[in-house]
Each structure stands twice: as C-alpha cells, then as structure tokens.
Image (spheres, helix red, strand yellow):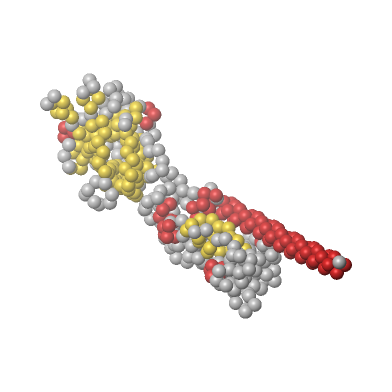
Amino acid sequence: MRTTQRGAGGVMIGVVLVLVVLVLLAVRVLSRVGDSAADRNQTLASLSRAADALDQYVAGGGINARLPCPADPSADTGVEVPASAKTCTFPAGTLPWRTIGLRRDDAYDAWGRKLSYRVYTDNGSKGSLVQPGGPSLVNCYADTHAGGGTDSNGQCSASHTTSSFDVLKKKGGLDLTDFGTDHTKNNNDPTAYVVISHGPTGLGGYTVSGALVVGAAGVGPSGDERNNTRDTGPFTLEAWSDPDTAADLNTHFDDLLVYRTVSDLAKRAGLDARAWGVTSLTFDPGTIALGGGTADPAVVDTGTNTLTYGATTITGFSAGTATDISYDTTNGNSGIGVYGGGSASLISSATNDSMHIGLGGAARQFAITLNDFNTFFGVVFETVELKFYNGTSGTPVLTSQKLACSATVGQLSTLSVNVGQDFTRVEVTPLSTTVFGFTVPTTFAISAISVCRAGVTCTTAIAGSGVTCP
C-alpha cells in the first residue's frame, strides 16, 4: 500500500514539475514576444521620426528644396556626402541624421544598428531628387495626362507647361512594393526615398562602429532582404517570416521600412502641383497695347491682324484672310472684333469672320466672355462655334456650339468648355441662325478669354459682370 502511495506521489511530483517547466517556457516565450513587440514599436517610431525630418528638410528649402544624400555608413558624422549636384558618394549609405536635424540616437533601431537610407538620384535628365528643386512640383500643373514635357533636368518647366504626369512618368524613381502594392515608375508613382531597419538579425545593416553586419558564413541576407540592402532596390515591405526561419534562407524577412512616393513627398512638403493657367486676358486698352495694337475707340482699327502675348497669339480673319483686329466699346463693355467685316468693330457671321487663338503650350479648358451676344424674342439665338485643335492637325479634337442665353442687349455672356484632352489652338466663329426661313447673322465682340489646365474651374476675370451660359 505504501509502495502504491509512493508511486502516486512520484507521479504527482512529475506532473507538477512538467507544469512548472511549461509555465516557465510560456513566460519565456511571452517575454520574448513582448520584447520583440517593444523593439519593433521603438524602431517604427525611429523610422517615423526620420521620415518626418526628411519631409521637413525638403519643405524648409522652399522652391529650391531637395532631399539629402546618404551619410558614409562607416563614419559616425551623420552628414550627407554628395558626389555632385545630382548624385551621392554613398548611395547605399545611412541616414544623415545631423544634416536633417535629428539626434544621433534617432538614427539607430532598437537593436543598435544604423538606419539605412536610399534616395533616387540620376546624373542626367530624369529628375534627381538631391538636386535643387528635385522633389518640387510647384511649377507643374496637376494632370494625369502628358503636357509640354519636363526641362533638361527632369523638372517642371518655369513656364508652367509641364504636367505632374510628365515629371512622374520621366523620373526613374525607386521601385518599391508595399505588401503587394506597387509604388514604381511603371505605374507613374515612383518612390522618392526609403529608410530601412534591417531588423533583429541586422543583416545588411551597419553597427555603431560602422561595420557591415553579415551572417555566420560571411555573406549578407538573401531574397527580398538582399534587395533592401541595394542602393536602388527594388525594395519590399512585407510581413516578417516565422521566427524559426533561418536568416540565410530566401524566405527570411525581418526588415522594417518607411518611404515616400514623389507625389506624396511633394504634397507633405507643400510643393505639390498648382492650378496654373495658360492664358487669361481681358481686352482693355492696356492689354491691346501690350499685344502690339493701338487701342483707340475713335479709330477702331488696332493696326494689326495679330495680337501677341508671349507664346499666345490672337489673329483676326474675314472670309479666310487675315484681317486687322478691331477694338471698340459697345454698351459700355470693351472687346475686340474683326475690322471692316460685317460690322466695323464686331465679329460677324455675315462676312465669315473668325478669331484664331494659338497657344504656347497644351491646355484642356477654355472660357470666353462675349459682348452683345443675345437672344431675341425667344426665337432667335445667336450662336458661336468653338473648334479646338492639337498641334498642326487640321482635324479638331472637339467642336462645340454654344447658344446665347441673355436677352439683355449689351450684357456680357461667359461660356466655358472642358475639352477633356489637350488642345493648342482655338477658332472662334459666329454662326448665322435660320428662323422662319430667314437667315439672321450672329455678331459679337470678345471681351475676355481664359485658357486653363485641368483640375481648375476655368472662367474669365470678368465673368461676374454678366451671365454665364450653359
């Protein structure tokens, strides 16, 4: 009986010991998990501070903003090392913490290794982000279609003829995949910079002393982690592998990354694209004189068939022949027309008058304010035809006919057209109206025009002085 009791007691002791071991193992595992989570969160906070500092560094430079080059990974200066105005000496270097105004401690992860830093550079015309103004889209207009192209440095043209699409399409950028979502040059959303922690293993990172961390076999990481050590990637942000996955396997991954795309960086830095127009003109004496004409209502004839405003030209035609532009004031509102046509100071369909507007760059929207463009008795509607051309093509990309909407003689009427595609030339032509078998000519003067990019409300400066027609 005693033997049985002693045996049972031994079993109980064994069970208790097993339970104690299991509890200790569970505590150890939970402790490791807790430590790992804390280290990860601490590192993510460091990465976030680094990204914010880089954004502010760009924003603080205003129109001449740029991203810094990486620091020498073997040194402890925290200072960027440019090789030229567009390139860097250490493209696979570390975060230049001193240059961007951080503390030294901010440039390390929770495992005591330096944060790596990559930035897009190019020594040619693709828009290096370390050159002055590299990340800026301020001189671009916002559009998802091609515009007038970039300048020789891959940046927005100072003439505001570059669309944001032009820059993002031409810029090589860094390729990065964020949990399967591409931020690459192939989808016009290239990555500007990446800040990297090489995780608990640290493979591919640098120690405090500036030594490269390699594995037991003397080689760096494999798979996606290896790409994350390169100066141009492609970079990958993905879930960590199982803790039991050996560090030298292609499937191992324990990196942490933060990044900005070019468009996101520009927006965060306050340097995103603007709603630049192409041309906005109100035809008063000063504007006529600026365009090379004489604005004397007593004479009407401006003395020129073409008014020129930079790359924008306005030419009068009568029956297909270039004809002097007129300037006059009708019912208190000034405007331009075709001199000596069906009406001495207006544009008339009776003599096949028209006005051709040539642009220096591509636009997408057009607004025009007409004077003396009316309806009569509810049955006669004066009509204007607007034809939009792109380049030298003789075929319009869009033809729009607009009817008068005001019965008040002398009231200004503003019309707007969203062409929806690029145009570089507009022809404004009055069309006669047939009512009860009678042909009634359309006559009007052009008081103002605006030629606009996409993404804005296109109207003229004097639209509020009259009515806006559908």
Residue 368, x across and y down, in percent:
32, 35
Residue 380, x across and y down, in percent:
21, 25
Q: On the rendered structure, is 137 left or right of 99?
A: left
Relative vertical location of residue 342 with respect to residue 159 in this rendering, above or below: above
Quadrant of the snapshot with the N terminus: bottom right
Residue 149 image-quadrant placement: bottom left
| Nearest the eye: 247 or 72 | 247
Residue 451 image-quadrant placement: top left
Quadrant of the snapshot with the C terminus: top left
Decide if residue 245 is in sight here. yes
Relative vertical location of residue 434 with respect to residue 222 in this rendering, above or below: above
Residue placed farthest to the top in the image?
Answer: 377
Residue 385 image-quadrant placement: top left
Residue 76, x across and y down, in percent:
68, 67
| Nearest the eye: 74 or 132 | 74
Relative vertical location of residue 467 with respect to residue 3 in this rendering, above or below: above
Decide if residue 79 is in sight here. no
- Residue sitting at 26 percent across and 46 percent down? 397
- Residue sitting at 21 percent across and 40 percent down? 317
Residue 331, x across and y down, in percent:
30, 24
